[in-house]
């Protein structure tokens, strides 16, 4: 008796982003407040990063709550019912429970039924990683619509007294509903990693070693304050890698999509640093007519949330239009990266 052949899965021919939404915490942290913690100046921070202010989440603005708010907007814009969502992917490095994934709670709160839900940890490339997974799920037939969320509470991992990072990070959530399309709406995702540089952006210490030390409690023995691991970054190596290597990845994404830089309706890079953005614009020979996301000025670096947050702002402000082609690229700790050309919702 011959072995039966497995019936192949089949899905949509193409996928696209149907809706995008964001959530920005209420509390605004201007540079003036950051200067209470570090020896610097507003001019230095703006010159080095382009950041004027950032948002930090309050006690009620949890990773779950911010995600639900952002996702609700994306689902509404997509014009679908939450029950139609066949997968929930949450990209984050600031959900501090190893298990269960925060995605399952978010899916339940949104009313996504029994949709598969999982977290991914790809730092600032997390949204691009999620987009690639969603595209494959839809074209592979395992889901009709997939919700991709990038969310961070990086204020929980920020050392307020570290002059090199205290001014950089912000909090927020961005979400996109990805679904079927009659025409290609997401180009080939160019993604990858370079583990040889894993230490240039990292957490200062693993959770198990941080909390197992005799001196893990501060406060003169009162047990009032834990020594909390924070994010550290070697600025110059990261800057050089982002400027030189990520411009090549961005060009590969353009080439894979068969799109020229002058045909773009928007350039939406991860909001890491305004100087990195400017250097990439130059390397890509991007025409001045192409709008560029500069959300970092008011939002800071929100890691996995930065691209969908910037996308939402550009669409709401009219800088970019529905149907425009946008080049997106995320890059960060790992080191990891992901770039693609997408059609804006």
Image: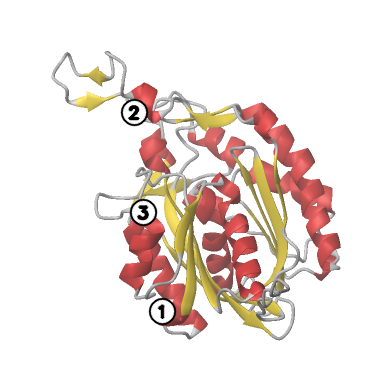
Q: Is residue 311 left or right of residue 236?
A: left
Q: Nearer the viewer, mark 1 or mark 3?
A: 1
- Up-down relation of residue 104 to residue 243 (above or below): below
Q: Can you say which quadrant of the picture contains the C terminus?
A: bottom right
Specify the label residue 63 is tagged with.
3
Give x and y (percent) for residue 133: 61, 62
Residue 22 x %, y %: 45, 65
Task: Specify whether residue 287 is in view.
Answer: no
Provide the residue designation for mark 2.
Answer: 228
User: What is the secondary structure assignment of the residue under circle 3?
Assistant: helix
Pointer 3 local density, CA inside 10 Å: few below 14, some 14–19, many at least 20: many
Q: Nearer the viewer, mark 1 or mark 2?
A: 1
Are there few (<14), some (14-19), or many (20+) residues within 10 Å of tag 1?
many
Mark carried by residue 82: 1
Q: Residue at x 72, y 61 (%)?
A: 340
Q: Nearer the viewer, residue 116 or 292?
A: 116
- Callouts 2 and 3 close, C-beta under 8 Å: no
Q: Secondary structure at mark 2?
A: loop
Report whether residue 336 is seen.
yes
Q: CA distance from mark 1 to mark 2?
A: 37 Å
């Amino acid at each position: 008796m011959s072995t039966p052949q497995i019936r192949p899965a089949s899905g949509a021919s193409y996928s696209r982003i149907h809706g995008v939404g964001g959530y920005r915490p209420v509390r605004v942290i201007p540079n003036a407040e950051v200067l209470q913690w570090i020896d610097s100046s507003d001019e230095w921070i703006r010159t080095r990063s382009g950041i004027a202010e950032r948002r930090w989440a309050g006690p009620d603005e949890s990773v779950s709550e911010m995600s639900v708010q952002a996702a609700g907007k994306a689902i509404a814009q997509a014009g679908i019912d939450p029950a139609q969502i066949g997968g929930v992917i949450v990209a984050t490095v600031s959900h501090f429970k190893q298990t269960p994934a925060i995605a399952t709670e978010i899916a339940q709160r949104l009313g996504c039924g029994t949709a598969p839900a999982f977290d991914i940890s790809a730092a600032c490339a997390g949204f691009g990683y999620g987009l690639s997974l969603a595209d494959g799920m839809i074209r592979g037939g395992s889901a009709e619509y997939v919700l991709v969320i990038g969310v961070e509470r990086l204020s929980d991992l920020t050392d307020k007294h570290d002059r090199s990072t205290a001014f950089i990070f912000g909090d927020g959530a961005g979400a996109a509903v990805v679904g079927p399309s009659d025409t290609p709406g997401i180009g080939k995702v160019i993604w990858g990693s370079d583990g040889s540089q894993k230490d240039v952006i990292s957490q200062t210490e693993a959770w198990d070693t941080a909390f197992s030390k005799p001196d893990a409690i501060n406060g003169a023995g009162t047990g009032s304050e834990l020594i909390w691991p924070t994010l550290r970054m070697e600025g110059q190596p990261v800057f050089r890698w982002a400027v030189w290597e990520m411009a090549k990845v961005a060009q590969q994404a353009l080439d894979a999509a068969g799109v020229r830089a002058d045909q773009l309706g928007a350039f939406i890079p991860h909001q890491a640093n305004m100087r990195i953005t400017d250097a990439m614009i130059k390397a890509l020979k991007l025409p001045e007519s192409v709008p560029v996301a500069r959300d970092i000025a008011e939002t800071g670096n929100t890691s996995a949330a930065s691209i969908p947050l910037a996308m939402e702002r550009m669409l709401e402000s009219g800088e970019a239009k529905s149907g425009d082609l946008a080049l997106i690229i995320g890059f960060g700790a790992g080191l990891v990266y992901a770039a693609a050309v997408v059609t804006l919702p």
